[in-house]
């Protein structure tokens, strides 16, 4: 059945869901407090790296991340074709570096289980490693090479998604300043500060780090909180870093536009998105340990965004049991760009009442109890 859906939040998650729901024939309206992509989504490094980001084991979250990576080739081509815009999408592969013999066991353990999940990865060391990444510090002992991982240029991707939504007929309202849920039990009615009421059959909550503000409205605990990520970029000649390079304290990723993006801190600073000297200095220290040529370089750009973290590290994706007309898609923490296509599919399936059982429990928005 075709329905009308109001989406609260115009970040990568809200826009991806809007794009998919519109393609399935639903009527979609996006309500955004500021401007689309103006928060975490526009700040992201754009890495699509399920293997490097999930070091513990193949849980439901890892499988969901992997599913999303595999959706990307077709999904991003659709976004480009429909929006008429282009953005960088690069299959660079990644290197997860280890400096000490003691770290090798962890890399080998990861490689074992990741191979069962489609990775053609290997441990590379010595000359083979420096052939792959010639400017890497000679202090690096070895690296886990994962050829399957990619990255994109997040601000351009989000802008293309927004455009794809607009050309397919999604209505987008920005700069709404304040929104309240006037009704969700009988019908959906969202009221803006200027007195407008947006009505719909269904509500999709995609408000990222701000999702917790709806706890009282829906009577559930929503332990989503902001974790600030400070990040910077250097201007470089040519392409001195070939892969996405990860370590325990940071990552580097070279972009087509000649910048080398280095991220990112993880600090608790409420909703403050300012950049601190201490935060960037810590990144610079790690950067020059990984790539000595960065020792005398200063980042030309520094910024920060708020990752929507959850108490258990899993996102909230699913319908409220007592009110199927309300669906959540929030709390994507470090992987919202990677998870954009899979979340769009899953949230749309939830709205259409056919969510796969695999994720229903793990990502249930009600798993933290009432509040
Ligand atoms: C420095 C940094 C680097 C990152 N790098 C990567 C990466 O390499 N790869 C990756 O996959 N992920 C990365 N992430 C994580 C990724 O950016 C997030 O997981 C993702 O952007 C979350 O998307 P979102 O749409 O849920 O949130 P947001 O982009 O924050 O969007 C939420 C939107 O909701 C709006 N909003 C808030 N309250 C309301 C309301 N009541 N009504 C309507 N709208 C509302 C906000 O204004 C905002 O625009 C990074 C994040 C940071 C900060």
Image (cartoon, helix red, strand yellow):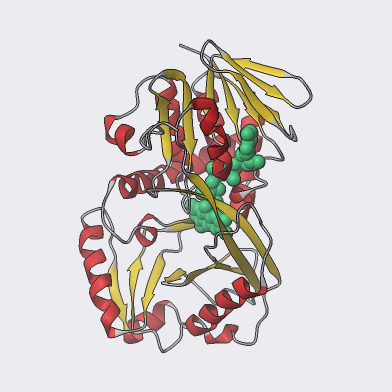
32 or 268, nearer to the observer: 268
Q: Is residue 336 in view?
A: yes
**In percent of the image, x 54 and y 35: which residue is there?**
206
Q: Is residue 46 in view?
A: no
175 or 134, nearer to the observer: 175
- Picture quadrant where residue 195 is located: top right
Seen in the image, is 58 located left or right of residue 370? Answer: left
Seen in the image, is 26 located left or right of residue 64? Answer: right
Viewport quadrant of the N terminus: top left
Please provide percent x and percent y for residue 202: 52, 18
Q: Residue furthest front?
A: 371
224 or 231, nearer to the observer: 224
Please provide percent x and percent y for residue 131: 40, 81
Please provide percent x and percent y for residue 297: 65, 82
Q: Is residue 344 above or below residue 102?
A: above
Seen in the image, is 197 located left or right of residue 141? Answer: right
Please provide percent x and percent y for residue 330: 49, 39
- Total count of labels: 0
Viewport quadrant of the C terminus: top left
């Amino acid at each position: 059945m075709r329905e009308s859906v109001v989406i609260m939040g115009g970040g990568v998650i809200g826009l991806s869901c809007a794009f998919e729901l519109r393609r399935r024939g639903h009527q979609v309206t996006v309500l955004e407090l500021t401007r689309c992509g103006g928060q975490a989504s526009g700040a992201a490094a754009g890495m699509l790296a399920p293997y490097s980001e999930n070091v513990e084991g193949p849980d439901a979250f890892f499988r969901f991340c992997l599913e999303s990576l595999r959706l990307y080739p077709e999904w991003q081509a659709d976004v480009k074709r429909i929006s008429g815009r282009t953005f960088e999408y690069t299959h660079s592969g990644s290197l997860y570096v280890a400096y000490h013999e003691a770290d090798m066991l962890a890399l080998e353990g990861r490689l074992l289980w990741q191979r069962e999940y489609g990775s053609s990865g290997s441990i590379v060391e010595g000359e083979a490693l420096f052939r792959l990444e010639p400017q890497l510090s000679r202090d690096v002992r070895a690296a886990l090479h994962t050829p399957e991982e990619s990255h994109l240029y997040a601000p351009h991707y989000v802008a293309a998604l927004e455009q794809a939504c607009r050309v397919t007929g999604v209505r987008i309202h920005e700069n709404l300043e304040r929104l309240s849920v006037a009704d969700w039990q009988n019908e959906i009615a969202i009221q803006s500060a200027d007195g407008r009421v947006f009505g719909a059959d269904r509500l999709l909550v995609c408000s990222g780090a701000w999702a917790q503000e709806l706890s009282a409205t829906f009577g559930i605990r929503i332990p989503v909180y902001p974790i600030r990520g400070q990040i910077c970029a250097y201007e470089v000649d040519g392409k001195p870093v070939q892969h996405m390079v990860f370590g325990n304290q940071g990552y580097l990723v070279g972009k087509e536009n000649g910048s080398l993006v280095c991220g990112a801190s993880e600090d608790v600073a409420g909703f403050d998105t300012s950049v601190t000297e201490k935060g960037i200095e810590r990144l610079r220290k790690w950067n020059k340990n990984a790539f000595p040529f960065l020792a005398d370089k200063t980042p030309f750009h520094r910024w920060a965004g708020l990752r929507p973290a959850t108490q258990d590290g899993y996102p909230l994706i699913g319908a409220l049991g007592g009110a199927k007309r309300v669906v959540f898609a929030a709390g994507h923490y470090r992987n919202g760009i990677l998870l954009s296509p899979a979340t769009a599919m899953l949230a749309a399936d939830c709205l259409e009442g056919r969510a796969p059982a695999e994720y229903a429990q793990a990502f249930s928005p009600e798993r933290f109890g009432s509040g």
